[in-house]
Image: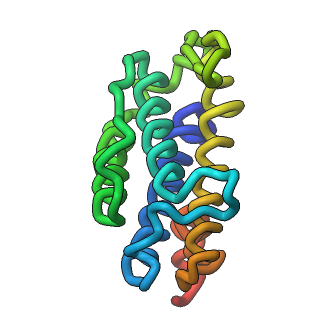
Amino acid sequence: MVYSLYDASIEQAKNILDAFLSILAKVEASPAAATIATAKIHESMLPFIFQVHFASVLLHKLSARLQGQPPRDLEYKNLDTVEQMRARLVEVKADVDAVTREAVNGRETEIVPLGLGPNIPEVKIEGWQYAHGYAIPNLFFHLTTAYDIARKEGVEIGKKDFITSFIGKYVADQVKQ
């Protein structure tokens, strides 16, 4: 087996989406569901709703850019409830699931645009650099932050809820649930 850009980016994106959806399912079943959208770890940090929004935007951009397509704009609205957040992630999951190995592999060195924030000029980097140096680390950051906010808000989740989306498929036949 050859480990490719698709494996390192799109397959990881699928795992991250599954972990987000797993966390949201636990949030939805908890008393925190009604207030989670605006919950934060610290007053200077962005709320749970932003973690879902930014991750969904980044997941969509990753799937589009690595296929050589322009991403569409995903607005920061209609994410006030867990149901709306889940619907957004399911929508983006369809984008990610539609990406094929053939559409990504071979594009490692194609140039993609990257905005690094307000008042910072857009940069151009290679697709593999975008995936490894920006998209995947940011996705893990926002997934972890959402997990931490949920824990802080009393949602009954643990490491297993986070990690199963990543390792579960490789060990399922060896581990009895």
Image coordinates of residue 119 in percent, x first then y, are 65, 16
Q: What sort of colour scheme is used for the picture?
A: rainbow
Q: Nearer the viewer, residue 114 or 160?
A: 114
Q: Measuring 33% from the left and 39% from the top, which residue is drawn there? A: 95
Picture layout, residue 61 above or below residue 37:
above
Image coordinates of residue 51 in percent, x first then y, are 53, 51
Give the image quarter of residue 170: bottom right
Q: Measuring 35% from the left and 36% from the top, which residue is drawn there? A: 75
Give the image quarter of residue 73: top left
> Is 134 displayed left or right of 101 in the figure?
right
Q: Measuring 64% from the left and 67% from the top, which residue is drawn there? A: 148
Q: How many marks?
A: 0
> Is 19 displayed left or right of 142 in the figure?
left
Q: Nearer the viewer, residue 71 or 170?
A: 71
Q: Residue furthest front?
A: 43
Q: Measuring 69% from the left and 52% from the top, which residue is drawn there? A: 44
Q: Nearer the viewer, residue 153 or 124?
A: 153
Picture layout, residue 34 above or below residue 11:
below
Picture layout, residue 87 above or below residue 135:
below
Picture layout, residue 107 above or below residue 93:
above
Image coordinates of residue 120 in percent, x first then y, are 67, 15
Image coordinates of residue 81 in percent, x first then y, are 33, 63
Q: Residue furthest bottom?
A: 177
Q: Quadrant of the N terminus?
A: top right
